[in-house]
Image (spheres, coloured by chain):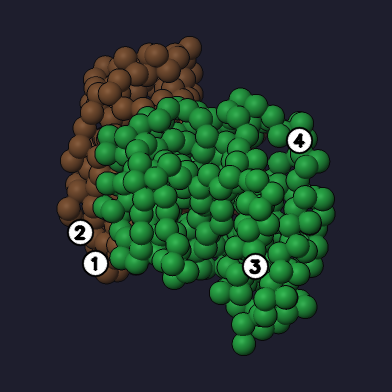
Amino acid sequence: MSASSSDRAALIEALGDELHQALVARRPVAPLSGRGLGLTVEDAYRIQERMLSHRLAAGERVIGKKVGATSKAVQSLLDVHQPDFGLLLSGMLYNTGETVPMSRLIQPRAEGEIAFLLGRDLVGPRLTVADVLAATDWVMPCFEIVDSRIEAWKIGIVDTVADNASCGVIALGAAARRPRDVDLELCGLVIEKNGDVAATGAGAAALGHPANAVCWLANTLGALGIPLKAGEIILSGSLATLVPVAAGDCLSMTIGGLGGCSIRFS
Amino acid sequence: MPLDAATIAELGAYLENAQLEARAVPQISIAHASADMDDGYAVQWEIRRRKVARGARIVGMKAGVTSRAKMRQVGIDTPSYGFLADSYAALDGGEIEARSLIHPRVEPEFAFVLKRGVEGPGCHVGTVLAATDFVMPALEIIDSRYRDFKFDLASVVADNSSSARFVLGGRCRAADDLDLASSGLVMEKNGEAVAFGAGAAVLGHPAAAVALIANLLARRGERLHAGDIVLTGGVTEATPVKAGDHIRLRVQDLGSVSIRFV
């Protein structure tokens, strides 16, 4: 048994290394789930940890977390009944007005989200949305540019979790408001690409309410002994359908009652 | 060549009877392949004339196919208009008999109520906002009189752009107190969210749909009038409903409106 468990550990390391290489070389790989390895979601989170260890070793730091698969549509696509999560690293962060080089992305798609900036630690489990809102300093508009290191986005839940929940880069808007000053559930989202309305949505698209997604994450990680830390950025999930982007595209978004964010791709 | 007056009268009766009897019929372009959008409007105005002659009051107008989601759903990319008769109004929190309709679908919309008339051509968002008394959330119940909800542009225009029922509710607010483009909405069916969107899905701004109707009406020498209700078209795809279904729409800063089908 010990031989088999060390084989398993070696397999997980190898897959994490492979995904990191795919990201660095911008060369997507075949779905892990289609390789007959019997990978579980738990294995996938260990692969994610291994994948990110290379960037952390190179000097990046964790600046927050993202919740993914928060909409019914994506959950049924992935055949799951709960969200997933990934880590946000310092090297992923852009600000509104900046240009994101396509040279670091493979097959990017933009999501409009609400970012929660925590003023206090959130230590789950058994937290409610009231705890989340009370611990949140600011909410901000944020693009998450998702990207997949898996060929042609042919992902199942294991593939996306292993691949850091398909996170690429994020871009924060310059607006910040207190959570009590925004209708987080009904606020509208408008994404324009090159001046055309490309997608619209509303806060409730993220697990019924964006704070629900943060609460799920705090409770899920809390059960494993991991707190969400003061100062972390928590992305609460996409509010509309994904918008594919290419070099030369300009993207802007507005969230009703909150503010906006604009980025370009070169 | 445009359809002649006798054909237009016949098609008006054909479509209005299909509506009154809640019976799906073949679309008019099958028997009249040459019918174009102007013919479609001629038939729609004939249906309107028939209703007014029997005492109906026209309480406003609706825009059809003003969002990309709707364009995809029906395979038509030209917006159109239809009229709203007083009998199409249902009450917020009330009921609609499903058997009075053929294959109803519900859309989340914004309703503009005008304090001044609006006359095209050349109307724009500013003209509309200046003429608007207030804005409300609205559910529009569309019901094509055509089999399988399938139609071309001339046919759907003739069929009054599938206009059937509408429900106004929630809060009324001055349009200049709201950022309608980024105003979010959630539509729920039997307690489950089925559609999310924001006002900008409608031609970039819902007021643009009102301007569009005014400009289209000008081609026939018509206009929007003070007091008119104007529905700006579905923000999202339409959701099919049947007896037993309950629909609730919630809109940012505008409250909610609901209807039950029995």
Q: Tell me which chain appears green.
A: B
Three-letter code for the amino acid on which mark 4 is drawn: Glu
Q: Which mark is residue B43?
A: 3
Disc 4 from disc 1: Cα separation = 55 Å
Three-letter code for the amino acid on which mark 3 is drawn: Val
Sequence-wise, the earlier of marks 1 and 2 is 2
The answer to whether tags 4 and 3 share a subunit is yes
Residue A187's spot in the image, x, y percent? 38, 35
Residue A178's spot in the image, x, y percent? 25, 24
Q: Which residue does the image show at 63% across and 58% down from the upper left?
A: B49
Asked whether the beta carbons under mark 2 and mark 4 sit within 8 Å of each other, the answer is: no
Q: Quadrant of the C terminus of chain B?
A: top right
Sequence-wise, the earlier of marks 4 and 3 is 3
Asked whether the beta carbons under mark 1 and mark 3 sit within 8 Å of each other, the answer is: no
Q: Which residue is disc 4 drawn over?
A: B97
Instruction: Name the chain letter of the residue that bears numbered label 1.
Output: A
Instruction: Name the chain letter of the residue that bears numbered label 2.
Output: A
- Circle 1 crowding by C-alpha within 10 Å: few under 14, some 14–19, many from 20: few
Q: Which residue is disc 2 drawn over?
A: A99
Q: Which tag is nearer the camera, tag 4 or tag 1?
A: 4
Circle 3: element type: helix
Instruction: Name the chain letter of the residue that bears numbered label 3.
Output: B
Asked whether the beta carbons under mark 1 and mark 2 sit within 8 Å of each other, the answer is: yes
Q: Which residue does the image show at 30% across and 20% down from the upper left?
A: A180
Circle 4: element type: loop
